[in-house]
Amino acid sequence: MAKKSPSMDKWIEEAKKNPDSSQIGMYLFHNGVVRETPKAKVRQGVDDGSQVTGMEFGYDEEKVQMAVEETKKLDGIYHVRVWLNEGELQVGDDIMYVLVGGDIRPHVIDALQFLVERIKTQCVVEIEKK
């Protein structure tokens, strides 16, 4: 059963109350969503004519926490928050939310890219349903 998605407005509100918030000049969000186009078509151009109807999604909490801690060590990064869904998801359901706050745009973009890539390649299991 999918979890209820968090409020990004509340996440930003809470982030701006943190002691390091005066160092932050940019926040970026990532919101991953279940899409009907299969990953193989989007990433490798392989089109077998199928469409995704849902996804089984799970993650390793310890690995996610390690990825968050690594991200916090990157230059200029002062805030990191992650939420991951789990269970049987449908097309349009939220898979993940990631918020990264840092001093300047290049640092924040790089950190968001680093963290999302780490989560997607090392921390989660996604099984598309067709």
Image: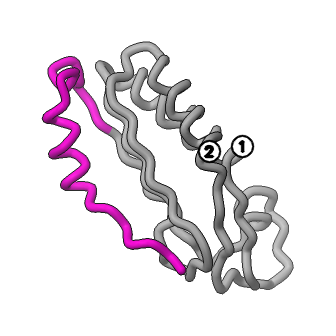
**Rendered view: 48 above or below 81:** below
Q: Which mark is residue 119?
A: 2
As for residue 7 lying within the magenta part, the answer is yes
* Residue 38 placement, left or right of 33: right
For label 1, the residue is 122
Q: Residue at x 45, y 24 (%)?
A: 72
The amino acid type found where label 2 is placed reads Ile
Tell me the residue at 37%/43% (across/down).
Answer: 99
Where is residue 51 shown, x and y percent of the image?
71, 83
Apparent side of residue 40 relative to residue 101 in the rendered image (left or right): right
Which residue is depicted at the point 40% across and 28% down? 108
Q: Is residue 117 above or below residue 4?
A: above
Q: Measuring 54% from the left and 38% from the top, which residue is drawn there?
A: 65
Q: Which residues are magenta?
A: 1-27
Numbered circle sitting on residue 130 = none
Which quadrant of the structure image shows residue 46? bottom right
Does the CB distance between marks 1 and 2 fall below 8 Å?
A: yes
Secondary structure of residue under mark 1: helix
